[in-house]
Amino acid sequence: MHAIAKRLLFSSAMATTVIFAMGAASPEASRDRYLRPAEAPAPADNQLTPDRVQLGRALFFDPRLSGSNWISCATCHNPGLGWSDGLPTGWGHGMKKLGRATPTILNTAFNPIQMWDGRKSTLEDQALGPIGADAEMNQPLPELVAKLSKIDGYRSMFKKAYPSEGISEVTIAKAIASFERTVISTESPFDRWRMGDAQAISESAKRGFETFTGKANCQACHSGFNFTDNGFHNIGVKNDGAEDVGRFAQRPVASLKGAFKTPTLRDIALTAPYMRNGAYRTLEEVVEHYDRGGDLKENLSPEIKPLHLSTQEKADLVEFMKSLTGKPMQVALPQLPQ
Amino acid sequence: MRKFIVITLATAAFIAIAGPAAAADHVVSQKDGAFSVGTLQAKSGDEVTFKNEDKVFHNVFSLSKILPFDLGAYGPGQAKKVKLDQPGKIQVECAIHPSMTMVIDVSR
């Protein structure tokens, strides 16, 4: 096994693969499903190697991937900001304000569907989308291939990473996806508690977990180790007049109007503001949203109902969510190929 | 000739008594985030009952040309029914959980 792949592993004692926690049992019985799987899956034609990850890291941080040569993937997916940007919604090419929040790329390796509206299925599919989008990085892809092909350092790196494939849109996507597969949540206090360290989280966080999996019904959507069902729900977030049909654009089914993909809660303390349009600055505001059963009732998910939580229960939920945040992954900025 | 008439009358009488083959009601459950079958073999005229045995809502739908339908969201313990009135293959999904997919293969 490659060293990179080994870095993705927890200890064997943590190896659990249950991701989709539909029929949840009691908190005690369901505990194992909240531990991270041992390996992040990768497609057969793009298994992780150190050369691929190194190339992907360079591409990810390289502003020359944009039409302006000024915006890199990391401009919006900033590792110092939870692999997001700290803004309500992203800013794209020409300082154009985008319509949706920049989602973290943390643990996207485990997601079978990508983007807020699920319009991409794999990381390879996803990687080229923002690069080629006029509003985002505004870099026509054929021109990008030509641009990178003129850089000696990249020619060498592509040759090592994909010896028989050359520099192409496909290998650019594969390399970026490979790097993204190494952006994995680290061990959090919550994980240590689950592995038996009773002191790893506070009593408030423990109560919060009980509320999360019980009265508050959070796990109906935020299920499994990654705290997402990879599903789509309209949770009634105010949109300030900027209507966004969300998943409905991909699947014109009535319940999907205004529905968006459930985001992970891993490292949630690092990824404010919250919701698909950055509507809330704090986790306390998020809990209040759910407690009142959302704001916009049209097409609201039937899972969203007023919760009537006490002040203590709300505080416990926030404490629990904070316990899902580990030490941020340390990423060395690459010297970009010349 | 007389023998042929007797057989024909007998066949007609049998059909009159037994009628055409009865339509079946297939039950497909949704449990642990999956349909209970990947492909359901059925006949035109059959019905399919989608039964939610999970603890969360599901929303079964199809955008297929031969039988587009949207059962809407329905909760734990609830069931909804679809009548298959044309032969063909029907791709079925859950709107809420896109990893839940199945096919209904309807024959004449």
Image (cartoon, rainbow, N blue to C red):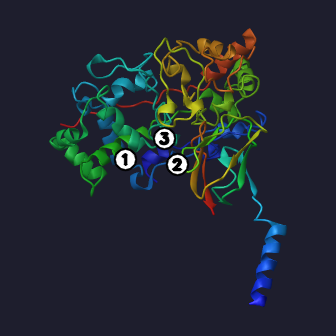
Q: Label 2 belongs to which residue? A: B65
Mark 2 secondary-structure assignment: loop
The numbered mark 1 sits on a residue in which chain? Answer: A
Name the residue type under label 2. Answer: Lys
Is the residue A233 above or below the residue A45 in the image?
A: above
The numbered mark 3 sits on a residue in which chain? Answer: A
Name the residue type under label 1. Answer: Pro
Whole-percent x, y for residue B28 in the image: 72, 51
Name of the residue lying farthest toward the right? B17
A263 vs B54, left or right, is: left
Name of the residue lying farthest toward the front? B2
Mark 1 secondary-structure assignment: helix
Q: Residues within 10 Å of mark 3 (few under 14, many from 20)?
A: many
Name the residue type under label 3. Answer: Ala
Q: Which mark is residue A109?
A: 3
Distance, label 3 to label 1, CA atoms, is: 16 Å
Whole-percent x, y for residue B48 in the image: 71, 51
Q: How many marks?
A: 3
Distance, label 2 to label 3, CA atoms, is: 34 Å
Quadrant housing the C terminus of chain A: top left
